[in-house]
Structures are given as structure tokens and as C-alpha cells.
Image: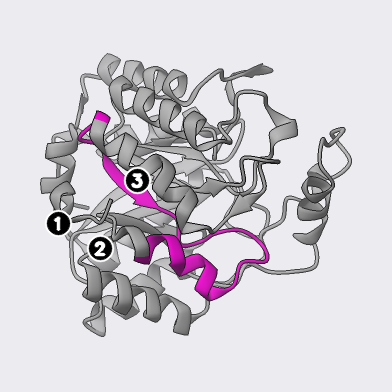
Amino acid sequence: MKKTDKAIITCAVTGSIHTPSMSPYLPITPDQIAEQAIEAAEAGAAILHLHARDPRDGRPSPDPELYMQFLPRIKQASDVVINITTGGAPGFSEEDRMAGPLRASPEMTSLNMGSMNFGFFGLADKFDWQHDWERELMLGSKRFPANHNFALIERIMVELGQGHGTRFEYECYDVGHLYTVKHFADAGLIKAPFLIQCIFGILGGIGADLENFMLMKQTADRLFGDDYILSCFAVGRPQMKFLAQSALVGGSVRVGLEDSLYIGKGQLAESNAQQVRKIRGILEALDIEVATPVEARAMLGLKGGDKVMF
């Protein structure tokens, strides 16, 4: 793992899985996404991970025009690094998933490193959903795996990485995904430093046990040596416990309402910034400095905010 003196805070502002009925604080409209993103940056996030949603009902949307309603506002208000999803949402085609990133040419995108069962169907009957699509999306995860095949991964690396100078947040939901990153690095399609984002607690991926955190780290150490920066998050209740673990071994962290809607036991977070402030307080209590956007760009070898297309 690359030895750094500072931790990068990534904030995942609004995801494709959490839905409007589950929290009134989840940003849905372009205005809400922009406002919460800017507030999270002001609170200390160096990177913002962003999805778009249909403002009419909160449905995940691949529409580049929606991205262009909030990306320029965020850029004008902050020097934060923008990271757009290529994972999208269930039902998105490959073209859908590429549309926003190709239009915006961001400094970073997420890149899921393998197809997998991605189960959140257990939530289907736990809420009174506002919109029909919400329950259908939950139930659909029992029947359809998340598609991140090798050909799609390679396409994203070539069209965005080589074509636009975009770098990636390599989302690794299990140990095998680390070996997939290594495969593409050995093939010369990607280069160090790698931001390896280890994700715990998704049904179908590696479980949210701290022993699994050390397994992922030790495997990444063997595969990448000093050529990677470790980051991690856990979905839901274990979120902060895993972030503290990552920080204690010199890694970075990711918070945000995409990953957990809560700030404490049974207490909904009222904003993304609230989670950023909480993890920043934990880091500073551990005498760990928080990286600025300028420092994060240098650590990750990013192309710079002046080379995006928004």
C-alpha cells in the first residue's frame, strides 16, 4: 500500500439503490444533489462520487442532461474532485452507463471489477414505497445479477481511461476483483497509482467482518505493493467501524448516503456533510490529516479539474 500521510475522504452523495421512501434526506433533484455535494466538499470531502436521478420520482437515470444540471454548479463552487458512476442501476444498458461519463469527461469514475449477485431484495417488504419502481427494483435484485463483464470493464478503461484521461475508483466487492485489477494492470490498460475501494456487506460480495478487511488489504499488498491507495466502506450499520479500521492502517475512507442512510443507531443522517464531519472528527482524533482536493489529485495522479467537459 502506498504510504501517505493523509487520508482522502470520498463522499458518495446519492446512489442508485437507496430510494426516496427510505429517507427524506436523500438528494434527488439536481438542485438537491448540487447543494448536498457542495456542503460535503466544504465539510472536508476531497472526492464526490455522483449518480443522477429523475427529479420526478427519484428513479436512477443515465441522462447526461441531468448530470449537466449539477456538475457545473459543483465545479463553480468548489475545487473538489468529481467522480461519476459507470455502474449505473439495474436495467441500464452499457450505452446508458457510458453516456454521462463520456459527456462530462470527469477526472474519475467508479469502475466495478466484476459481475456479481447484488442482493437487496430483503428490503422489498420493509417499507411503504412511494413509487412502484422502488419495490420492483428491490425484488429485481433477486433475479438479475449486476453485469460488469470483462469486455465492459475493458471498454471503460479504453474509452474513458485512454480516451479521456479519466482515472478510476476500482470498486472491489470480493477478493477476486483485486485479481481482475491486477490482470488489467499487467495488460497495460491501466497504470498506478490505483485507488482500490474495498466494499463490504453487499449480499453476494464479501461480508462485513473485520477479518475480511485484513484479507482484502493483505491480498492487495501482495498484488500491488506500493502502487495503490487503500480505501474502504461497509454498507449500512458497520460503516464507521470499517472506516476507522481503514484509517488505522493508513488507508482512506468513503462515506455518503449511497452507502448508509444513518449517522448513528436508528438515526437518519440529515445530509451527506453530516457523515463527512463525523468521519473527519474521527480521523482528526486519531491524528490523521485529511487530504485536500489538491493533495488528492497529486496522490492519485489525476488530470485536473481544468480538463473536464463541464
Left or right for 63, reference 133? left
What distance separates the C-alpha of mark 2 from that of mark 1?
7 Å
Left or right for 109, reference 136? left
> Visible in this render: residue 112?
no
**Badge 2 is on which residue?**
166
The structure residue drawn at horizontal position 26% and vertical position 38%, both measured from the top left corner, is: 75
Instruction: Identify the amino acid type marked 1.
Output: Lys
Q: Quadrant of residue 102?
A: bottom left
Q: Quadrant of residue 41?
A: top left
What distance separates the C-alpha of mark 3 from that of mark 2?
19 Å
Q: Position of residue 240 (x, y in %)?
A: 48, 28
> Visible in this render: residue 141?
yes
| SS at circle 2 | loop
Residue 11 part of the magenta segment: no
Q: How many residues crowd mark 2 within 10 Å: few (<14), some (14–19), many (20+)?
A: many
Instruction: Identify the amino acid type marked 3.
Output: Ser
